[in-house]
Amino acid sequence: MRKHLAGLTSEEDSMNQLITAGNTQQLTMSSREIAELTGKRHPDVKRDIEVMLKALERDVSSFAHTYFDSMNRKQAEYRLDRELTETLVTGYSIPLRHRVIKRLHELEQRKAAPGWLENLSPQAKVVIEDLNSQVNHYRQETDRLNAVCNDLAENLKAGLTPVEFCRMLNGVNLNRVQAVLVERKRLLKTQHGYRSAAAYRDKLFTERRYLNKEDRPCEKVILTQKGAKWLYSQYEQGQLEMRKDWDGNYTHMLFDNEEKAA
């Protein structure tokens, strides 16, 4: 499921919207997609758009749309047509500008394709509408999962172990986190703790050396951001062992230090 969701990019979402509306819908690009393409923070891109629209004496509110983040909170984004999108990125660096304009060209090519829809039978149109509905569902789920993963990855600045990371996930049996990773051959159990399996070192995990109570050098396994996203996907897919008192909800939160696993 997760693998399928990951393949539904915002570009495919745009294509879906264009196919649904045919050639009559104006090509637009969202502020979130611009942020993704340029590597900028979404709030910064929104601010750039607001400054641009005010300078052009355009009504900012007429470009506003809403979406729901990982906590099911309503958030704002903007959707710009091609002209305004190109105006916005004029002030960006050449590589960033190139990414956005290249995406616009790709979407335009996709938009020109669905003229044959008018000649389809009613049954075929029903099938396409059903597929579009499924794509919309998966797109929304992808956005939610990506937002959750990004929120959780932000907490890796200090360097979290798998167990510390799982403290933020509702219901995980913390006593079994490392054991499960060993069983899946992601970690190796050593005499003095755990180490990353070679195939996943510097990909899902990094290692930090420290001295234990006996002043013996040991390695601590730390999650990378990619590793955090992978571990969260395992959680969402029900691949981690849960506490006996788990309420059945897959949510993330910060736990008190005193909380203990069942």
Image (cartoon, rainbow, N blue to C red):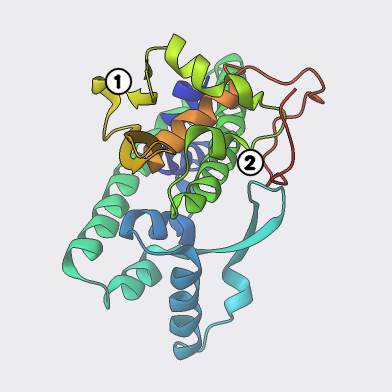
Residue at left 57%, top 43%? 148
Task: Name the residue carrying label 2.
Answer: 168
Residue furthest top as drawn: 183
Task: Name the residue carrying label 1.
Answer: 197
**Residue 39 position in % (x across, y down):** 34, 59
Residue furthest front as drawn: 214
Q: Callout 2, which amino acid?
A: Met
* Number of numbered labels in the structure image: 2
Residue at left 43%, top 64%? 41
Q: Nearer the viewer, mark 2 or mark 1?
A: 1
**Residue 92 position in % (x across, y down):** 26, 73
Q: Is residue 80 visible?
A: yes
Real-space CA distance between mark 2 and mark 1, rounded to the nearest whole angstrom = 24 Å
- Element at badge 2? loop
Residue 85, disc: none
Q: Is residue 25 visible?
A: no
Residue at left 43%, top 77%? 48
In the image, 249: left or right of 62?
right
User: Where is residue 249, by image quadrant?
Assistant: top right
**Going from the N terminus, do you reach mark 2 or mark 1 first?**
2
Q: Callout 1, which amino acid?
A: Ala
Tell which of 176 and 2 is nearer to you: 176
- Element at badge 1? loop
In the image, 140: left or right of 24?
right
Residue furthest left as drawn: 94
**Residue 184 position in % (x across, y down):** 43, 11
Tell which of 257 and 72 is nearer to you: 257
Q: Given contact means CB atoms under 8 Å apart, are the residues at marks 2 and 1 in contact?
A: no
Q: Is residue 219 above or below residue 53?
A: above
